[in-house]
Image (tube, grey):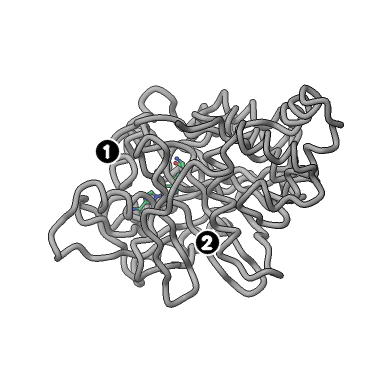
Amino acid sequence: MTRPLINDLSRAELAAWCEGQGEQKFRADQIRKWIFGKRVNDFDAMTDISAPLRKTLAESFDLFSSRIAAHQKSQDGTEKLLLELHDGERVECVLMREDDRRTICLSTQVGCGMGCVFCASGLLGFTRNLSTGEILEQVLRLDRLLPPLERITNVVVMGMGEPLANLPNLLKALAALEDKGGLGMSMRRVTISTVGLPDKIRELARTGKSYNLAISLHAPENQLRNQLVPVNDRIGVEAIMEAADEFFETTGRRVTYEYVVLREKNDGIEQAQQLAQLLYGRNAHVNLIPMNAVTELPFNDPGAERLRQFVDALERSGIVATVRKRKGADIDAACGQLRLRHEQPVAASYSPSAAK
Ligand code: SAH
């Protein structure tokens, strides 16, 4: 029998539980410091908590609900975990190392319902939302891969799923990372990537937190975007841009536009010019992501030359663009690929692909 996951509780909920046990509220922060700060994996290791309370904690909650089903390490220091959840479902999360940065990439759903035609996560459809505790568990598992003095510095919510379709659970998880009893992390180091759900973008802005917003645009106009991102059909680029502008006005945070570059699909000079026109006058940053090949999908990387021409065309129009570095090229680190491979074992010809 599984018990409730302790990290499904917010700080206030855990404090209330402690009070219900006849304990002081501050015990909640003590418990969380052990879990997040001191990386213990067992309630019994929480030595400043009384033995009876430790016992009640262990009888009342689970600290983890997943097991590591696969662990891959790349030559470049990137590590990827496939976690098997209590119900047998699987999600991926990634740790990337670069200079002083330790960036983790988190999933928010099992599968995804958005159906982007180039994305491995969408291939198997949407199964369910992750709970707050399941989102945090990815943080804990990845954090425990680091040596004692290293800490997670940045979080990108760019793993499996559509984060804004699971916003309450995500916000509760991020609050735990921000809490002093949690990781004490600044929300300026958190980036949430979305397919572009206008109402949810506004909701995110209203939280008053300094999250970075990244919008997965992938096409500068509706006809092409409808083909690549089917949910666009009932949203539209205009509504997304309006919500993004509001997000910038409310938060003062520059919005990033992600653009997966697909050879001969959306990588023409014409699209670069349309994109520049769309973003003209906006405080925007474009992040180009060369397509990570997925065996099952008929899309390709643009290649160095076409990519350079696309970047040049954007820059000539005054748009700042960066190309996302590839990480974990040797370990299936692109979103959803590891899970896909474990769900549907494919022939030995499967070619591991690069991560974003
Ligand atoms: N649902 C969210 C977050 C998850 S995907 C979103 O749409 O933003 C994170 C980013 O990876 C998105 O920009 C997504 O479009 C991109 N992506 C998905 N599949 C990819 C692939 N095969 N190659 C490159 N980027 C991909």
Name the spot of residue 54 as percent of width and height, x first: 71, 41
**Mark 2 and mark 1 in contact (Cβ < 8 Å)?**
no
Give the crowd class for mark 2: few <14, some 14-19, many >=20 residues within 10 Å: many
Residue at the (61%, 48%) spot, across then down: 191
Q: Secondary structure at mark 1?
A: helix
At label 1, the amino acid type is Leu
Numbered tag placed on residue 124 in the rendering: 1
Tell me where residue 209 sits by quadrant: top right
Q: Quick check: 147 above or below 269? A: below
User: Which residue is farthest bottom?
Assistant: 75
Numbered tag placed on residue 95 in the rendering: 2
Between marks 1 and 2, how big is the CA–CA gap?
24 Å
Tell me where residue 31 sits by quadrant: top right
Residue in the foreground of this view, choosing between 48 and 85: 48
Residue at the (50%, 73%) spot, across then down: 77
Query: Which quadrant of the figure contains the C terminus?
Result: bottom left
Residue in the foreground of this view, choosing between 310 and 205: 205
Tell me where residue 249 sits by quadrant: top right
Query: Which quadrant of the figure contains the N terminus?
Result: top left
Can residue 77 be seen from the camera position used here? yes
Is residue 338 found left or right of 288 in the rendered image?
Answer: left
Name the spot of residue 106 as percent of width and height, x first: 51, 48
